Structure formats: structure tokens, C-alpha cells
């Protein structure tokens, strides 16, 4: 069988592991095994499934240091952020385990006597998951734990840039008591992902990644039969800074939001929409901080910004910066690929601030997925919010102001799935729904109580114990003499 290597993006000569390139036959086998194991799993009481998920959280917590190091090595995330990635999975286990001992549906009064009505949730069977490399432990946990709680089997195709992290996550689940056949991992790039998306044995497909790939996955998944398809796609997240804002806070937020994870979060702050009265001061502060950030080995605790995931990724980012300059933007800092001591062959990109960006510039509309902050100066609040909303994406947005009416008015009018006030566009917490509007997704939310929806079907149950035929709507309102 052909294989591929997962490498450390900071030092590509450091091979993290070698993995098989799976084909459609392997996907068939994985779906069959997960499907066979699912039948027994779905018969377990839901709190018993929850106990296994809680145990998986305990294994992840016990192994946090080792997993954090693996995330740093394989995905290039600096240690503190890699630790956050693992912690997000630990939190998810706790949250989902709690859902297993919570209400599982609703009882609804019947309009007729001697009749009970309620809703419950059922598994879809086997779920097919396609996950990115940038949250290589957290995002699998967002999908796998709710899928398991709902009683499903799982086949997951992780990014070819983070296969070892996914294997480590699945190993923790298996150590905790998840049957080994219940979660199967297939590796490779587009071929196994496509085979999974169209597989007739897969009842729901859940994808996190780019818009173009998400569209292909959804089209393929629906072509081979109607099924649940949930998409979590990109963002073009804006931070609005009003003239009354606390500029220290806004500086900290912009630096963390734009350059955290080297800008490679779907929630990364990529547009700063700032009032001209404070633009000069704020941009100066951000530029100064950006220039001071230490690029380096993500496993070195002194590093602020790690590499981007691959050399082609750095080239793509450089191309977008060049395009922005061509359209009239100015590079205030960064703007080019960089190197870092001791990181032979690593693809780094200097934290970049672009000024003079206009809403119609490509860099103000398209996701960069790199450490690039585009600054747009807008005075009027209505216009600033129009700029926030004037893109195809709708994941996350932030507004910095000390004025409560400005803050709450912005919350009302910003058309994104997540809005932050006086906090950056990154940093979503597990008990709350995560997802976006417009091209960012197709209406599902991950995490929170709604995270289970994409992996389960609601069943509505009516039990009539009256012993006679009762007719809804008709018995309650028999027609009168006038036929009403
Ligand atoms: C992502 O980038 O795909 O809110 C997920 C955040 C993280 C999750 C990001 N908790 O930035």
C-alpha cells in the first residue's frame, strides 16, 4: 500500500509518522466495521455511552502534556495554543458526557386526552467525518464525542497534515472503552474523503475545511442519496474598533486574534475596521507588537508564532499580500515569508499588517488563512457594520467600544454566528454553539447542546391510551352548522 509522511512543519526533515494512503476499498471496510460495531453500541443506555466519553476525557487530560507536544510537532501550533487545543477536547468530553445525563427530548401536551407526545433522538448509523489540521484534537472531539453519544459508529478522515494527532485522539477513546471497530480512521487526501462522502453506508457527513472543498463534499454527498450533511467552512472575521474603545485591550485582541495560530484559525481576525480618529495610534501599536513577535520552533516556550502549515501555504499567503499591494494596500509590517533559527526548511510567514485596504480589495473579501491583518478605516458605525457584513462569510466578529448602545446595536446587526464584545474573534467555548452564517456553513452548529443535531435524527412519538380512535385537529374542533 502507498504511504505518505506527516512532517513537522517547523522542520520538515523531522518525520512525525508514516501513514497509509487509503482508497475506496479501505473506506468500504471501515464503514462496514463501524456499522457492525454500532449496533451493539446503540443498544447501550445513553448514560453508559456518556461514561465512556467521560473516561476518554480523563485519558486526554492525563496525557495532555504528550498530546500538546504532538500537536505542536505535527501542526506547528505553539505550546500554549496546542495545550488549548487538547483542553478543548477535554472540555468537550465533559460537556457531552453531561448531555448523556440530561434531557434527551421534550414532552409536549397533547391536544387530545389519554395521549402522550414526546421527542427523542436516534443515531443515524455511521457518520463520515472529514477534519482539518488546525485543531487536530479539538475538532475531531467536536464531532466524535456527540456522534458517539448519539449512538453512532464513526469513520474519520483527518487532514493529511495531522494524521498522528487524530490517531492519538482515537487511541485515547479506545483506551477509555470505545470499541476499536466503532471509530475507524482512514488516511490520505481527496480520494478517501470523497469515497467517505458518497458511501451509501454513511448516514451523515460532517466536514470542516475550506468553502470550495465543502461545496464539493456536500454536492457529492447529496448526489448519492439524501443524508445529513453539515459544513463548517471559512471566515473573514472582522474586529470593529470604535473611537471610544480601550486601545490597550483592542491591541491585545488584534494581536492575539490575527497572529495566534499564525492566523490559521477559521476564526482568526483578518480585518480590522477602525475609526480614523484612533486608526493611527492603534495601527502603530499593533505594528510594533507584530514586529516583536518571535517566530520559531513551536515547541520552544519562548516562541510566539510558529510556522504556517506548508511551503505552498506560505507562497499562497505571499501571493495574497502581493495582490493586496497591487490593489493599493501598504505593507506596514511583515509581508513576506520568513525563516527561524533552528527551523531548517520551515515555512514561516512574518506577522503582517496591511493598511489602506478597501472593502472591495481581494484581501478584504477572501480568507487568507495566514498571519495577515487588513486594516480598513471607516468612520460611520452603520458603514462599519455594512463592511463587516459585506463578505460571503459569517463566522465570527468582534466590536470594541465602551458604549453599551454601540455594543448591543452591533450585536443586533452583525450577521455572523458568533459576536464578541471587547474580546477578539477567536476563543469560542465548548458549551456554546459554534458556527456561522452565509457561506460559512449550512445552518448546523457544533459544540453546545446543538452539537448533537448533525449526528442524530429526532423522532416524534405519539402514544394513544384512550382505547378509541382520536383524530387530531378534527375531534377538537368539529365543524359547526355553518361548516366552520
Ligand atoms: C477553527 O479555527 O476551526 O474559537 C476552530 C476558536 C477556537 C476554535 C477554532 N476555540 O478560535
Image (tube, rainbow, N blue to C red):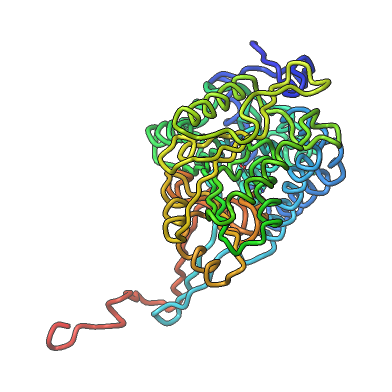
Relative to 46, is 353 above or below? above
Q: Which quarter of the rendering shows the N terminus?
A: top right
Residue at the far bottom: name it.
481
Q: Position of residue 366 (x, y in %)?
A: 47, 36
Tell me what residue is drawn at x 52 percent, y 55 percent: 417
Pick the front one: 111 or 63 = 63
Tell me what residue is drawn at x 65 percent, y 57 percent: 423
Pick the front one: 284 or 137 = 284
Tell me what residue is drawn at x 65 percent, y 31 percent: 334
Q: Position of residue 394 (x, y in %)?
A: 48, 49
Visible residue check, residue 450? no
Q: Position of residue 89 (x, y in %)?
A: 73, 46
Q: Which quarter of the rendering shows the C terminus?
A: bottom left
Which quadrant of the picture is home to ligand 1?
top right
Relative to 469, is 144 above or below? above
Pick the front one: 396 or 74 = 396
Q: Position of residue 379 (x, y in %)?
A: 47, 57
Determine the image quadrant of residue 65. top right
Visible residue check, residue 7? yes
Determine the image quadrant of residue 391. top left
Pick the front one: 438 or 86 = 438
Residue at the far top: name it.
2
Tell me what residue is drawn at x 58 percent, y 41 percent: 266
Instruction: Report how many numbered discs are placed on residues in the image.
Output: 0
Amino acid at each position: 500500500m502507498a504511504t505518505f509522511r506527516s512532517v513537522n512543519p517547523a522542520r520538515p526533515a523531522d518525520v512525525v509518522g508514516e501513514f497509509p494512503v487509503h482508497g475506496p476499498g479501505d473506506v468500504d471496510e471501515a464503514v462496514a466495521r463501524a456499522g457492525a460495531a454500532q449496533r451493539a453500541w446503540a443498544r447501550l443506555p445513553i448514560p453508559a455511552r456518556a461514561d465512556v466519553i467521560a473516561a476518554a476525557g480523563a485519558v486526554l487530560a492525563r496525557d495532555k502534556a504528550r498530546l500538546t507536544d504532538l500537536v505542536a510537532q505535527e501542526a506547528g501550533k505553539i505550546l500554549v495554543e496546542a495545550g488549548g487545543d487538547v483542553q478543548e477536547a477535554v472540555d468537550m468530553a465533559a460537556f457531552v458526557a453531561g448531555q448523556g445525563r440530561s434531557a434527551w427530548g421534550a414532552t409536549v401536551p397533547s391536544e387530545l386526552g389519554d395521549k402522550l407526545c414526546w421527542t427523542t433522538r436516534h443515531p443515524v448509523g455511521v457518520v463520515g467525518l472529514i477534519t482539518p489540521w488546525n485543531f487536530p484534537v479539538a475538532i475531531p472531539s467536536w464531532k466524535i464525542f456527540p456522534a458517539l453519544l448519539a449512538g453512532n459508529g464513526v469513520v474519520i478522515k483527518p487532514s493529511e497534515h495531522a494524521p498522528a494527532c487524530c490517531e492519538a485522539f482515537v487511541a485515547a477513546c479506545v483506551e477509555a472503552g470505545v470499541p476499536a471497530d466503532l471509530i475507524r480512521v482512514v488516511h490520505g487526501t481527496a480520494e478517501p474523503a470523497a469515497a467517505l462522502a458518497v458511501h451509501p453506508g454513511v448516514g451523515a457527513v460532517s466536514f470542516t475545511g475550506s468553502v470550495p472543498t465543502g461545496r464539493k463534499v456536500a454536492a457529492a454527498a447529496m448526489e448519492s442519496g439524501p443524508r445529513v450533511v453539515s459544513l463548517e467552512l471559512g471566515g473573514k472575521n472582522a474586529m470593529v474598533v470604535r473611537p471610544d474603545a480601550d486601545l490597550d485591550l483592542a491591541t491585545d485582541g488584534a494581536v492575539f486574534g490575527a497572529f495566534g495560530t499564525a492566523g490559521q484559525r477559521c476564526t482568526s481576525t483578518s480585518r480590522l475596521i477602525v475609526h480614523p480618529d484612533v486608526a493611527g495610534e492603534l495601527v502603530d501599536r499593533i505594528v510594533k507588537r507584530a514586529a516583536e513577535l518571535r517566530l520559531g520552533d513551536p515547541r520552544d516556550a519562548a516562541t510566539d508564532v510558529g510556522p504556517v502549515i506548508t511551503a505552498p501555504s506560505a507562497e499562497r499567503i505571499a501571493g495574497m499580500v502581493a495582490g493586496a499591494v497591487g490593489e493599493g494596500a501598504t505593507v506596514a509590517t511583515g509581508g513576506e515569508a520568513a525563516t527561524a533559527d533552528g527551523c531548517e526548511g520551515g515555512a514561516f510567514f512574518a506577522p503582517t499588517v496591511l493598511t489602506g485596504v478597501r472593502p472591495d480589495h481581494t484581501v478584504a473579501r477572501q480568507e487568507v488563512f495566514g498571519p495577515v491583518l487588513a486594516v480598513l478605516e471607516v468612520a460611520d458605525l452603520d458603514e462599519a457594520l455594512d463592511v463587516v457584513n459585506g463578505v460571503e462569510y459569517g463566522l465570527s466578529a468582534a466590536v470594541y467600544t465602551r458604549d453599551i448602545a454601540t455594543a448591543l446595536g452591533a450585536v443586533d446587526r452583525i450577521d455572523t454566528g458568533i459576536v464578541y464584545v471587547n474580546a477578539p474573534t477567536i476563543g469560542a467555548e465548548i458549551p456554546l454553539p459554534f458556527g456561522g452564517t452565509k457561506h460559512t456553513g449550512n445552518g448546523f452548529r457544533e459544540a453546545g447542546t446543538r452539537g448533537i443535531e448533525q449526528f442524530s435524527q429526532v423522532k416524534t412519538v405519539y402514544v394513544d391510551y384512550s382505547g378509541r380512535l382520536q383524530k387530531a385537529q378534527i375531534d377538537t374542533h368539529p365543524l359547526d352548522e355553518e361548516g366552520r
